[in-house]
Image (cartoon, helix red, strand yellow):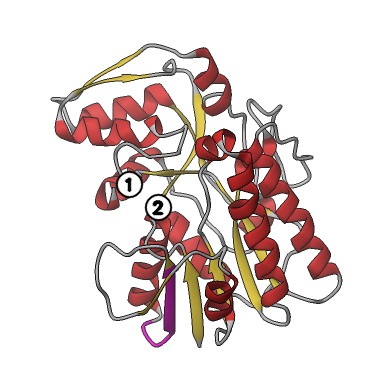
Amino acid sequence: MRLTITGGDGFVGRAVVRRLRDTHAAVELLLVDRTFSEAGPERRLIGDLRDPAVLADATRDCDALLHLAALPGAAAEGSPVESRAINLDVPLKLIEAMQGRRLVLAGSIAVFGAAPAGPVEDDTVPTPDSVYGTHKRMVEIAFADAVRRGAIQGAVLRLPGIVARPAGGGGFGSAFLSDVFHAACAGVPYVVPVAPEATSWLCSVTACAANCVAALLGDWTWGEAITLPALRVAMGDLVATLTTRFPQACITHDEDAILRRVFGSYPRLMTQRADALGLRADPDISRLVSAALATG
């Protein structure tokens, strides 16, 4: 089987490649990204998917494609035109190019907007309130229409907060959710910009990669987007788990009202559709931390 992974050198992309190497070593991989930080046995395609020639090369010979490449939320808000080109136009072109084959698109919980009313379930109506979330929602609608027409197989997966991304998290307004891991490990002072009772939906990159691979290699198709399972984590509980593991950690809180509203006010999450398909969250906060530290 020939698989293409866009964003193959990104944080989630590298985890997906590791998962495929460990569990499906016989598949043939083509990794697509604008740059690559390290060599590997897989075929590489360096280029920008906004270039029609690069997109054609990425889709020409594959049986299934996982699209992870994106412009992150904060960067998208600062450049709506670039977000449209990357987060909307490229996925729409992939839907056209992959007709008759399997396509899995990385969506986002940003389609629910900031501080969604809860609980959030499969039938909760998306109400995006950002450029990033709006473009992701538009892709969901286009994908659902392609499934309705029988033109495509696969799914759109709404990714939650994935930890622990590299420190600094360029372009991600939620970078603090990962930066706190790195600060705890290093034993350097860190101020969390939300209160201890702030809640977020989190998933380790290991669990996220497992779900992406399961969807890419699956034989099921969903027109409606699938919200991936995640742990609803209170920031105080995350800090307590980290400081138990790293007693030298010095973590305090100083709440930013905007960050609290956007990234720290998530209600209870129920993902019956994903659960029925065998997609899984990290079992508990301790194991989420262990998995995040192993790859963060």
Specify whether residue 27 is painted magenta.
yes
> Dot 2: few (<14), some (14–19), or many (≥20) neighbours within 10 Å?
many
The reply to whether residue 227 is visible in this rendering is no
Q: Are marks 2 and 1 in contact (CB under 8 Å)?
A: yes
Q: Residue furthest right?
A: 149
> What type of secondary structure mainly makes up the magenta span?
strand
Cα distance between the residues tagged 2 and 1: 7 Å
Judge from the rendering whether residue 6 lies leftward or rightward of residue 11; answer left or right: right
Q: Amino acid at mark 2?
A: Val
| Mark linked to residue 205 | 2
Does label 2 or label 1 sit earlier along the sequence? Answer: 2
Q: Amino acid at mark 1?
A: Ala
Q: Residue at x 28, y 35 (%)?
A: 181
Q: Residue at x 52, y 48 (%)?
A: 71
Specify whether residue 77 is painted magenta.
no
The reply to whether residue 87 is visible in this rendering is yes
Magenta span of residues? 25-32
Measured as percent of width and height from the top left, residue 110 is found at 62, 39
Q: Residue at x 45, y 37 (%)?
A: 172
Q: Is residue 235 above or below residue 296?
A: above
- Which of 172 and 263 lies nearest the eye of the viewer? 172
| Mark linked to residue 292 | 1
> Which type of secondary structure does the marked residue at label 2 adopt?
helix
- Which of 231 and 105 lies nearest the eye of the viewer? 105
Q: Is residue 239 above or below residue 281?
A: above
